[in-house]
Image: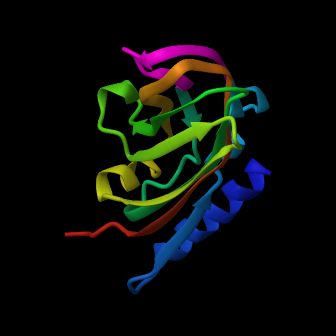
Amino acid sequence: MRTRAFVVLAVAALALAGCGNHNLVAKVDVLSYLDASQRVTYVGDLPEGSLPEPVPVVSDMVINLVDGLGAVTARSVTLSLGGQVTVASGSGSSRLKLYLSDESTPPLATVPVMDVPVTFSSAGPAVISAEAACDEAVAELFTHKSLHLAVVLDDVVVASPGVTSMTVTIGKLEAIVLAGRKAIF
């Protein structure tokens, strides 16, 4: 599957090398780079109150992208994130934060590219569905050979008496990248 994506992107990059102001639109299924075990995170029981530290959902992981897109520059990227937070009992709120960085920067040292409020309770799963248009610096990450990704639950506040069996599931994580020819001066 990844070989086919490479061939399609390589052909598209060659097409961009021709004349005119051609654009390449690439849909990157970032979720497919996560193992099944990384898509579901069992957090467990949390006590009442505010947690002092973020809860890791996906730790700093390297995502190896398609090499050979040096002839293009990314103009924009739109990220889509979907999933859910479930608890067996209790309630509370938090923020699900997605971080992306280049090969030499830890993702948690950067500003989150997505910051989604989540309110969870035992009444049913808290559905996460968010989309964000990112700046050119984030879009440019998708033209590199690899990038780093991290997802955390931050600003977690748990109501009395606490929550049991919290689970975070990521069901969708994709990027739509708009790229074009690099300007030649």
User: Left of 45 or right of it: where is 110?
Assistant: left
58 within the magenta span = yes
- In the rendered structure, which segment of residues is drawn in magenta? 42-59
Q: Residue furthest front?
A: 160
User: Left of 130 or right of it: where is 115?
Assistant: left
Name the residue: 52% across, 51% down.
Answer: 68
Inspect this view and state whether residue 70 appears. Answer: yes
Inspect this view and state whether residue 104 appears. Answer: no
Q: Residue furthest bottom?
A: 20
Q: In this picture, is 131 found above or below 84? A: below
Name the residue: 39% across, 36% down.
Answer: 101
Q: Main secondary structure of the magenta part?
A: strand
Q: Nearer the viewer, residue 18 or 154?
A: 154
Q: Residue furthest left?
A: 185
Q: Position of residue 58 (x, y in %)?
A: 57, 27
User: Left of 31 or right of it: where is 185?
Assistant: left
Q: Nearer the viewer, residue 122 or 184?
A: 122
Q: In this picture, is 59 found above or below 181? A: above
